[in-house]
Amino acid sequence: MKESGDFTVDDVVQGICEKMVRRHPHVFGDAHVENAAGVSRQWDKIKSSEKNNLKTAGGSVMDKVSKSMPPLARAQDIIRRAARAGFDWDAREPVFEKAQEEFTEFRAEMQGISEKNSNIDRLEDEFGDIMFSLVNVARHCGFNASIALQRANSKFEKRFRKVEAMCKEQGKEMPEVGLEGLQQMWKQAKAASDDRPQTSTA
């Protein structure tokens, strides 16, 4: 703070302004970029050349991925940084095919399960690949995988609570209702709480 002779709010604002101008020569200068991907590459190139980032120059783009991030958020950041470095498909179809390929590999590993071999390590590896590939699917489709999972959690919880309430109305515990009955209740709960965004047909 200013009282201790370190910095002031004005110093911080000035530093941010200078950084924005320096990193956006296509806006504040004469540089030309053709698309958003070009802007991202230019941003990263300028950042890597700045004095404060010289110590990481020549390293991996993965060096800046925080290891303290939750796994899903970290997967998103890893994929985003790899894509900005040019390691990315330019269409959605190969991304979908990769996710399907990971499902196929997971099912193949399931065939190795036996009484003597639970195959857990391999299953975890392949399941992790499925999740990672689906995060990339989300990115290519333009939405955040974390938000999508949060919405799925919320929907499931809401519908499950309705099923519990239906069971109580019948004076039964869930095991007494049986799977077939619970599935019917689930369909009712789903229909009653369908809060998906409506698409316009106009």
Image: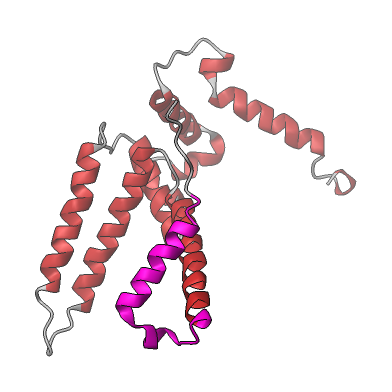
Measured from the top left, where is residue 29 in percent x and y? 55, 13
Which residue sits furthest right? 3
Q: In the rendering, at what x and y percent does residue 77 appear? A: 43, 48
Residue sitting nearer the eye, 81 or 1: 81
Q: In this view, does 130 lie above or below 139?
A: below
Q: In which quarter of the image is the C terminus?
A: top left
Report whether residue 66 is seen. Answer: no
| Frontmost residue, 174 versus 113 | 174
Q: Which residue shows up at 13% across the image and 80% down it?
A: 113
Give above or below for 5 relative to 43: below
Q: Which residue is drawn at 19% across and 72% down?
A: 122
Query: Is residue 180 located in the magenta-colored stretch of the structure?
Result: yes
Q: Give the range drawn in magenta.
A: 168-195
Report whether 92 appears left or right of 148. Answer: left
Q: Is the magenta stretch mostly helix, strand or loop?
A: helix
105, 122: nearer the viewer: 105
